[in-house]
Image: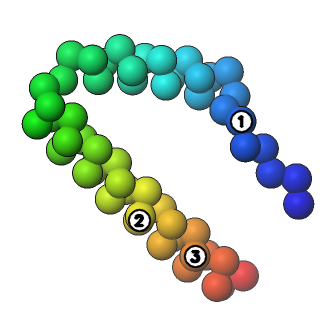
Amino acid sequence: MDMPIDLNLEQKFNLKVYEEQIKALSQEESQKLLLEVLRQLMVKDNMIKHLLKQS
């Protein structure tokens, strides 16, 4: 299976936008945001595993 591992142009642009927004956050806000992103990644992993088990 051929899986792309690089970001496409739109994703690179969005990442740059997020980078600029993050610069304005305090350390506490950054830590809260990081924890939320990690939580969402874990939920995404769980959903993918569930979908793979069903197929």
User: Disc 3 vs disc 2: Cβ atoms closer than 8 Å?
Assistant: no
Q: Which residue is mark 1?
A: 6
In the rendered image, residue 20, in percent from the top left (x then y), is placed at 35, 14
**Which residue is depicted at the point 27% across and 50% down?**
36
The kind of residue on which mark 3 rests is Lys
- The quarter holding residue 9 reads top right
> First in sequence: mark 3 or mark 1?
1
Pick the front one: 48 or 37:
37
Pick the front one: 10 or 27:
27
Q: CA distance from mark 2 to mark 1?
A: 22 Å
Numbered disc 3: secondary structure: helix
Q: Nearer the viewer, mark 3 or mark 1?
A: 1
Numbered disc 1: secondary structure: loop
In the picture, the quarter occupied by the N terminus is: bottom right
User: Disc 2 vs disc 1: Cβ atoms closer than 8 Å?
Assistant: no
Q: Which residue is mark 2?
A: 43
The kind of residue on which mark 2 rests is Val
Q: CA distance from mark 3 to mark 1?
A: 22 Å
Q: Which residue is mark 3?
A: 49
Left or right: 11 as drawn, with respect to 43? right
**Which residue is depicted at the point 72% across and 82% down?**
55
Left or right: 17 as drawn, with respect to 27? right
The kind of residue on which mark 1 rests is Asp
What is the crowding at mark 1: few (fewer than 14 residues within 10 Å), some, or many (at least 20)?
few
In the rendered image, residue 47, in percent from the top left (x then y), is placed at 51, 70
- The quarter holding residue 8 reads top right
Pick the front one: 31 or 18:
31
**Which residue is depicted at the point 13% across and 26% down?**
26
In the rendered image, residue 6, in percent from the top left (x then y), is placed at 71, 36
